[in-house]
Image (spheres, helix red, strand yellow):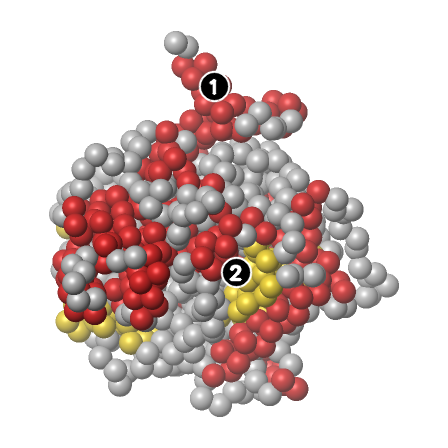
Amino acid sequence: MDPGDVSRRRFLQASGGSLGFAWLAANWPQVTAAAEHAHAASLADPGDHSRLRLLSATQARDIEAITAQIVPGGDTPGAREAAVVYFIDQVHAGAWASGAKQFLDGLEDFRARCARHHPGTRHFADLPEAEQLAYLQHVERTPFFEQVRFLTIVGLLASPRYGGNRRKYGWKLVGFVDQHAWQPPFGHYDAGYAGFAPYPDPRA
Amino acid sequence: MTGRTFGPNETVDFVVVGSGAAGGVVASELSRAGLSVLVLEQGPRRSAADFSHDEFDTWFDLGLSNALDTNPQTFRASASEAARRVVDLPAAWYAPMVGGSSNHFTANFWRFHEVDFDERSRLGAIPGTTFEDWPITYAELEPYYTRVEWDVGVSGLAGASPFDPPRSKPYPMPPLPVKSSGVLFERGARKLGLHPFPAPMAITSVPYHDRPACAHCGFCIGYGCEMRAKSSALYTTIPDAEATGSCEVRPLSYVARIETGAAGRVTGVAYFDATKHERFQKARAVVVCANGAESARLLLMSANAQFPDGLANSSGLVGRNLMFNTYAQVHALFEHELNEFKSVQVTRILHDFYDADPKRGFYGGGGLDARSGPMPAVWAAFAPPPGRRWGAPLKALLESMPRAMMVATHGTSLPLASNRVDLDPDLKDAWGLPALRVTYRDHPDDLAFARFLQDRGVEVLQAAGALEVWEDPVLDANGSPHLLGTARMGNDPRTSVVDRHHRAHDVPNLFVCDGSSFVTSGRGQPTMTIMALAFRAGEHIAQFARRGEI
């Protein structure tokens, strides 16, 4: 295939066909090159949901249950549907490996306290939804909960290549569109802007 | 890569340490004058194709930032505390790479106003501070602001702000297209009788020189620009310098010290190459443009028997008077979609509160801008207020992100001798050099003014019809990408490090030019003034060289 075709195809994909012809004509060579590689990150290397690298299956189940309380599903996908637990697993085996031990210690402490708090239930994930919510409200000021809250949000909205944001559910939730180039109007309020009206010259 | 290559035994006219906003300009000015220039840059050389939209890598793994594992830093709020090793964000935050922090900056390019240079004379002394006039005036710097706008490339609308200082030429490019945040900000501010205007930005609004117009991808703040639309040194002054044929930019070259000879003059610099081998580069003169933290650190690391307190430090001021600028945020939600993830961060600003007003009861001045905020993970992680940080309330807030915007405040930091960078007595970097230690606590007036300005931001957003408005707490700073004041300019060698031409008072063939040269902080957005100072310094230093006065 002609490499130019690839660029052109990717660019049209990237721009959603929304750009004016004159703008394209002026910028075509630069935009194709830029769009090509800017999208490489999201097109290649989708998150691996086939295996856990750090967490055990039971740990992962508890983490997933916590993430599902932080950004719940329902009418639209939440953190569970976006596979955020895989981000949390992979990031501690990769970029944030230096924090893995502290994270796992925090998780085990969370699991132990939760089990003590709920005699007869071994795992947070096995609690009924309402009890999960109540327990997290009880511990929401702990550093571990804050850490999982942060990880959940980052994993939900980071590129899918990091394991979360599956099917770009996170980006869809926040209305973010992964596209290289845009043209005005960008939103509702700039669509009807009448232009900048100058102020009277104070020196006149 | 173009330009010249110097052999290991060649003596160059100038070594320039650092290739960022200041170093790029100084290198291009000196090499244009026919002088031989070697730029030593500690970081790698990246190209446009190396930049991505990867928010995790950029914001959560600090892909472009100084690396805290190899280049550790420590921080403390005052000298009475033990400094702790910094994790998360660097206290002195910059981008070690060719082009420096001009790669990842937001590209707000306000000129300073006349008052920034002689405010001490206008307001009088402020007890407990080292508040001083600059040794130069706005009028002296004006031609160089114009050079920045035209040589480097700035978009804007001349005369739009009634508070603008005089200018000799209009902007070379029209303002970038207004975003919904800018329209709402303008609407609210005008209702209050304020004077919002199109933001001057170092981003191409139309094709400029050899660069295309901005594609409005939205990834400016913290990111390198893969369109070459952001007017960073990497795309402007560095290629200009190399095109002269008399400048080499050498990446992965980490300067360890500046050496001096018997006459008290600089003889060259010792640096580590990419393989961590120490090399020595002979030079007739050295210009340090390593940023407001690293320039001071290098001078301090260059202490020797003749200069026991560090090079150029007879005043004891090297590293002191560190200023960060204050920054505060207000968030708002509106009825309809703004889609702030598109296009540049800022399209409207206002300067109605630029001047200090003694009637407020505290010192301070600054500006407001309408902006997107970093996006989307940074916003989601940090913007939610108490009560909406998780669960169904968080999800509802996340769904409203297309209707969100921010107003940011940019304000003064008073110079304090106690705020400083110096060498950590214990911690070393991966090359065995002393780590940077940062000591910083905001002056109470700085925080009071930041809160004052933040409240003005709330009023603007309410007047614009926001459905909801909330403020981030204004906290003591523990770091910044604005690194200012640590080798201040002045006429008196007892109270300043460099003279009005950036020449070290103590060493005739040593110059320091970057954010460290600032006497006061301005109102944020320092890069424009760093570049203007560098054009002026480059011109004067080249003249000194031609006249044999170095």
The residue at 64%/61% (across/down) is: B467
Position of residue B462 in the picture relative to residue B314 (left or right): right
Is A128 rendered above or below residue A117? above
Indicate the position of residue A129 as horizontal and vertical percent values: 33, 57
- Classify residue A160 by image quadrant: top left
Kind of residue sitting beneath label 1: Arg
* Chain for disc number 1: A
Disc 1 to disc 2, C-alpha distance: 39 Å
Position of residue A105 in the picture relative to residue B415 (left or right): left
- Report which residue position mark 1 lands on: A9
Is B235 rendered above or below residue B403? above
Pick the quarter of the image with the C terminus of chain B: bottom left
Of A201 and B1, the residue lying toward us: A201
For residue B456, the mark is none
Pick the quarter of the image with the N terminus of chain B: top left
Position of residue B245 in the picture relative to residue B432 (left or right): right
Contact (Cβ within 8 Å) of mark 1 with mark 2: no
Position of residue B28 in the picture relative to residue B97 (left or right): right
How many numbered tags mark residues here? 2
Of B511 and A188, the residue lying toward us: A188
- Residue lying farthest front? A120
Is B106 rendered above or below residue B443? above
- Residue lying farthest top? A1
Task: Answer yes or no: is residue B256 visible.
Answer: no
Of B404 and B315, the residue lying toward us: B404
- Report which residue position mark 2 lands on: B525
The residue at 58%/61% (across/down) is: B332
Q: What element does badge 2 sit on? A: loop
Task: Answer yes or no: is residue B441 visible.
Answer: yes
Kind of residue sitting beneath label 2: Gln
Is B249 rendered above or below residue A34? below
Indicate the position of residue B220 as horizontal and vertical percent values: 48, 46
